[in-house]
Amino acid sequence: MCWRPGASVEALHSQRDMIALQVSAVYKKAREGGLDVDIMRGTVKARRIPPAEREAANKQLAAYLRIIEAAETAETAKPRAVAAAA
């Protein structure tokens, strides 16, 4: 029997399509059960990241949020100081 790479690839694509349908069905059932599918997808994505990398990314995200919040606080404080000086 001769190996046919085209047939192998086609079979893999078919399997991938069937799995994609199964995943879609799970998300649809979750949505019907009242879950937020966007949050669920994010959770699944995060769990695929190794724990150490996920923890490092979470620390970096927290640092960025603190920087942004500090900048917003400073920005909202400026107009009040200017108004008070006028």
Image: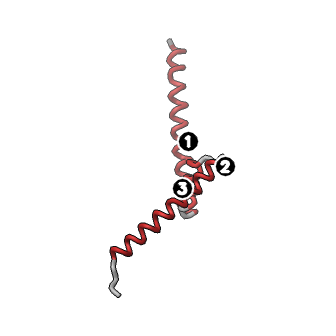
10 or 47: which is nearer to us?
Answer: 10
Q: Residue at x 51, y 59 (%)?
A: 21
* Other residues around mark 1 within 10 Å, as few (<14) / some (14–19) / many (≥20): few
> Which amino acid type is marked by label 1?
Arg
Q: Where does label 1 land, which residue?
A: 66
Instruction: Check the image and report above or below for 14 versus 58.
Output: below
50 or 68: which is nearer to us?
Answer: 50
Q: Are marks 3 and 1 in contact (CB under 8 Å)?
A: no
Residue farthest along the top direction in this orientation: 86
Residue farthest along the front direction in this orientation: 1
Q: Residue at x 51, y 14 (%)?
A: 85
Instruction: Check the image and report above or below for 67 versus 74.
Output: below
Label 3 vs 1, first from the N-terminus: 3
* Other residues around mark 3 within 10 Å, as few (<14) / some (14–19) / many (≥20): few
- In the drawing, what numbered circle is on residue 24? 3
Tag 2 secondary structure: loop
Label 1 vs 2, first from the N-terminus: 2
- In the drawing, what numbered circle is on residue 25? none
